[in-house]
Image (spheres, helix red, strand yellow):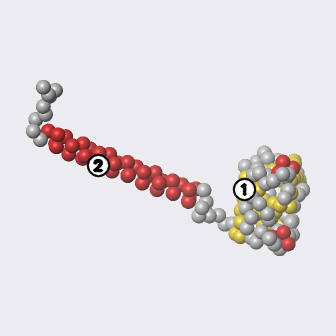
């Protein structure tokens, strides 16, 4: 005795419907994966800077410490209330340090490294730039309050990483 007999053609129709259903879901999965990959590629390339979108430039890490403007290590006036400084990271110090800047002036930091990856973070501010050998990154900041601000390396750079501290001294504004 058989359990139940299927009508003729039922099994073939069932398999055709199941195959059609499976193809629809495979198509949906491929479309979703394609969208995910395109979104990830867009995010990585444009947001994380695989395609660099800065006005930074390149510097030879082997000779950056001996070539201007990094060799000069000074605060340079670039406008009425604007200055630029070229900061060089190297095991395990920041040059120039200490750096005296006037309160209320727009300071543009150009940051690079001569050896390994370093992190240029000024505590108490929003300044955070990765110092990459051969690449010069930049950030502009205005110090509103006088005092001493510490530059720390926030990328592990070796055995003396924790001692890599620089100083920015913001001098009080002079009354006009």
Q: Does 7 sit left or right of 78 as displayed?
A: left
Quarter-of-image position of residue 104: bottom right
User: Extreme left residue here?
Assistant: 8
Q: Nearer the viewer, residue 136 or 16?
A: 16
* The C terminus lies in quadrant: bottom right
**Residue placed under numbered mark 2 in the picture:** 23
Q: What residue is at 81 percent from the left and 63 percent from the top?
A: 88
**Residue placed under numbered mark 1 in the picture:** 129
The picture places residue 112, in percent across and down from the top left corner, at 76, 63
Q: Nearer the viewer, residue 158 or 149?
A: 158
User: For the residue labelled by badge 2, is the local secondary structure a helix, a strand or a loop?
Assistant: helix
Sequence order check, earlier mark of 2 and 1: 2
Camera-near label (2 vs 1) is 2
Q: What residue is at 85 percent from the left and 51 percent from the top?
A: 160
Q: What residue is at 80 percent from the left and 71 percent from the top?
A: 62
Quarter-of-image position of residue 82: bottom right
* The N terminus lies in quadrant: top left
User: For the residue labelled by badge 1, is the local secondary structure a helix, a strand or a loop?
Assistant: strand
The picture places residue 143, in percent across and down from the top left corner, at 79, 52
Density class for disc 1 (Cα within 10 Å; few <14, some 14-19, many ≥20) is: many
Q: Is residue 41 visible?
A: yes
- For the residues labelled 2 and 1, the Cα–Cα distance comes to 49 Å
């Amino acid at each position: 005795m058989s359990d139940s007999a299927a009508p003729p053609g039922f099994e073939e129709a069932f398999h055709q419907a199941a195959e059609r259903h499976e193809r629809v879901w495979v198509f949906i999965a491929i479309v979703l994966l394609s969208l995910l990959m395109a979104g990830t590629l867009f995010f990585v390339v444009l947001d994380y800077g695989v395609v660099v979108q800065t006005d930074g430039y390149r510097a030879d890490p082997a000779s950056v410490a001996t070539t201007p403007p990094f060799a000069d290590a000074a605060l340079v006036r670039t406008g009425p209330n604007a200055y630029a400084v070229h900061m060089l990271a190297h095991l395990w110090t920041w040059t120039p340090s200490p750096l005296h800047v006037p309160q209320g002036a727009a300071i543009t930091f150009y940051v690079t490294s001569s050896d390994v990856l370093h992190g240029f973070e000024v505590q108490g501010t929003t300044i955070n730039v990765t110092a990459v050998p051969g690449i010069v990154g930049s950030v502009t900041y205005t110090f509103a309050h006088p005092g001493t601000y510490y530059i720390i390396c926030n990328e592990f750079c070796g055995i003396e990483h924790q001692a890599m501290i620089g100083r920015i001294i913001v001098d009080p504004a002079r009354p006009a």
